[in-house]
Amino acid sequence: MKINNWRNRARAFWRSESGLGTLEIVLIIAVIIILALLFKDWIIALIEKLMGKADDEANTIFD
């Protein structure tokens, strides 16, 4: 009986339509910024690599 009650509460919590509060939004933004700072060098290298490939492909198309 207790397990069913717990399941019902969990389902009700999951389905609740309450909006996000300011604190949750700030925490999500903080996590995204921290991840971006941690992987900054990798992200920049990836973008430069992709842009280089796009530039090479554009040069072969327009030559």
Image (cartoon, rainbow, N blue to C red):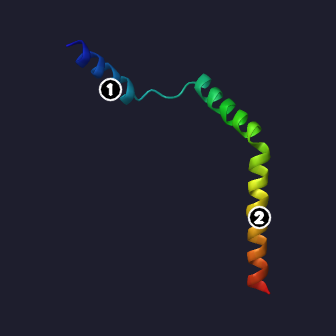
Q: How far is the residue under mark 1 from the one under mark 2?
A: 46 Å
**Lateral position of residue 46 relative to residue 3, left or right:** right
Q: Position of residue 4 (x, y in %)?
A: 23, 19
Q: Residue at x 77, y 84 (%)?
A: 62
Q: Residue at x 79, y 59 (%)?
A: 48
**Lateral position of residue 17 relative to residue 53, left or right:** left
Three-letter code for the amino acid on which mark 1 is drawn: Arg
Q: Is residue 53 above or below residue 32?
A: below
Q: Residue at x 38, y 28 (%)?
A: 14
Three-letter code for the amino acid on which mark 2 is drawn: Met
Give the residue at mark 2: 51
Q: Which mark is residue 11?
A: 1
Foreground label between 1 and 2: 2
Q: Is residue 20 above or below residue 49?
A: above
Q: Earlier in the sequence, mark 1 or mark 2?
A: 1
Q: For the N terminus, give its image quadrant.
A: top left
Q: Secondary structure at mark 1?
A: helix
Q: Secondary structure at mark 2?
A: helix
